[in-house]
Image (cartoon, rainbow, N blue to C red):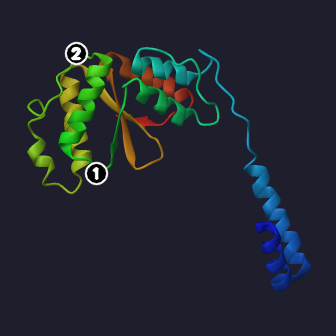
């Protein structure tokens, strides 16, 4: 007997025939809502996410999964070293190391070092150390002409990226077209 069959048998015993009918209607509605869509791919240049990818990584992906576009974009950017994915409670030194990897992979003209972000001792005394560290780093990066943003992934992590300050307004305008969720 399937799981549905077991559930229907219990519903029949407890609630009678009307309960079984209601349970079936609810099950069918949920199944219809979760309908599995075969993988679709966004054609190159046909989606705003392609432009966002190009602004962050300097190139466009060939395809993105239309069923999971944000996840697909983050994975693509991560494979190219264009983002640093950090946990919400990451230590300041680890944030710096992750940002250094992005700077090297993307060949950005930035100095990202513990010396540059000398204020990191203050982060350690704070309960919101990661948020504080990111705020201070973002301010320092602005002085070097770069904005640090993050893509909202739906998890408890930060997907950080760096773009020239000159691209920030255009990136905001493009992303608002599709309600792509990120912050500065």
Quarter of the rendering occupied by the C terminus:
top left
| Residue 164 seen anywhere in this rendered image of the structure | no
Residue 130, how many percent across, how many down?
25, 47
Side (left or right) of 52 relative to 144: right
Asked if 5 appears above or below 180 in the picture, the reply is below
Query: Looking at the image, which residue sits at the far right?
Result: 17
Could you tell me which secondary element the residue under label 2 belongs to? loop
Indicate the quadrant containing the N terminus: top left, top right, bottom left or bottom right: bottom right
Instruction: Please give the name of the residue rendered at 40% of the width and 19% of the height, measured from the top-left corner.
Output: 57
Residue drawn 76% across the image and 46% down it: 35
- Residue 51 is marked as none
Between residues 113 and 1, which one lies in front from this camera angle? Answer: 1
Disc ID at residue 89: 1
**Circle 2 crowding by C-alpha within 10 Å: few under 14, some 14–19, many from 20:** few
Q: Quadrant of residue 179?
A: top right
Q: Position of residue 90 (x, y in %)?
A: 26, 47
Q: Classify 40 as above or below 86.
A: above
Q: Name the foreground residue: 54 vs 37.
A: 37
Residue at image coords 64%, 31%: 66
Whether residue 46 sits left or right of residue 50 in the image: it is right
In the visual, does 121 lie left or right of 99? left
- Residue sitting nearer the eye, 19 or 172: 19
What's the CA distance linking mark 1 and mark 2? 27 Å
The crowd level at tag 1 (other Cα within 10 Å; few <14, some 14-19, many 20+) is some
Q: Quadrant of residue 64?
A: top right
Q: Is residue 145 above or below residue 35?
A: above
* Residue marked by disc 2: 109
- Across and down, in percent, residue 176 comes to 51, 29
Mark 1 near mark 2, Cβ–Cβ under 8 Å?
no
């Amino acid at each position: 007997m399937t799981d549905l069959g077991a559930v229907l048998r219990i519903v029949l015993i407890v609630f009678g025939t009307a309960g079984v009918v209601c349970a079936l209607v609810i099950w069918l509605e949920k199944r219809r809502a979760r309908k599995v869509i075969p993988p679709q791919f966004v054609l190159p240049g046909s989606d705003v996410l392609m432009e966002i990818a190009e602004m962050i990584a300097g190139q466009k992906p060939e395809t993105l999964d239309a069923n999971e576009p944000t996840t697909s974009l983050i994975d693509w950017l991560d494979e190219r070293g264009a983002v640093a994915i950090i946990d919400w409670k990451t230590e300041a030194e680890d944030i710096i190391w992750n940002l250094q990897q992005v700077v090297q992979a993307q060949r950005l003209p930035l100095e990202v070092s513990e010396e540059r972000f000398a204020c990191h001792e203050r982060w350690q005394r704070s309960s919101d150390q990661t948020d504080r560290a990111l705020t201070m780093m973002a301010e320092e990066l602005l002085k070097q002409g770069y904005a640090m943003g993050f893509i909202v992934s739906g998890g408890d992590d930060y997907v950080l990226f760096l773009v020239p300050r000159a691209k920030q307004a255009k990136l905001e305008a493009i992303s608002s077209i599709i309600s792509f969720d990120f912050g500065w």
